[in-house]
Structure formats: structure tokens, C-alpha cells
Image (cartoon, rainbow, N blue to C red):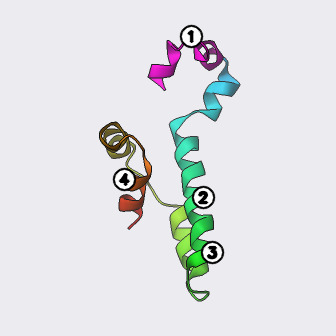
Amino acid sequence: MRFLAGHPHVGALLGDPGIAAIFAPERDVGRMLHVEAAWTRVIAPPSEVGRLSDAIETAIIDQAALGAATARDGVPVPELVRQLK
């Protein structure tokens, strides 16, 4: 999020605590986990849906590794999925 602080269009928004909270890394990862859990509920065998979606939604994600992989890959999802596996 540091790179957005100097952004000419949205940088000023991050000075607002409410907006900054929306873009907080923990919330961003939480939203990604929510999407992955929803996807799992669609594709997983019915007998595994609860266990798998609960595990995904409560997963502890290594933020530093996610950041490094995002810088390398350009997107966070491959690293997120790797960590979930």
C-alpha cells in the first residue's frame, strides 16, 4: 500500500483511517480467502465442503512471502494457492 501513498489520484484517500482500513493487507487477504472458500464450496465433494472451506477461511497466510511472490509474479493468487495447499 506504500506505493499508493504517492499516487496522484488515490494517495489522499489513504490518509483517511476508514479507507486505509479497507485496503489493509489483512483485509485484502481475508477477501481473497473468502473467494477461495466460496470457489471450494462449488467444486469440492459435498462430504469435504465444510472442512475445506473452514480451513481456507481460517488459514494463516505468510504476508511477507505473499508480498515477495506478488512482486515476482505480478499477482498474489499463485502464492496464496500455494500456501493453502
Q: Disc 3, disc 2: CB below 8 Å?
A: no
Q: Which mark is residue 18?
A: none
Checking the image for residue 8, the label placed there is 1
Residue type, mark 4 in image: Glu
Horizontal and vertical percent for residue 84? Answer: 41, 63
Query: Which mark's residue is nearer the viewer, 1 or 2?
Result: 1
Marks 3/4: CA distance?
21 Å
Label 3: state its secondary structure.
helix
Q: Mark 2 belongs to which amino acid?
A: Val
Mark closer to the observer (4, 1): 1
* Residue kind at label 3, given as amino acid type: Val
| Segment tinted magenta in the rendering | 1-15
Dominant SS of magenta comes to helix
List the residue tagged with mark 3: 42
| CA–CA distance in space, label 1 to label 2 | 30 Å
Asked whether 6 falls inside the magenta stretch, the response is: yes
Q: What residue is rendered at 66% in x and 22% in y?
A: 17
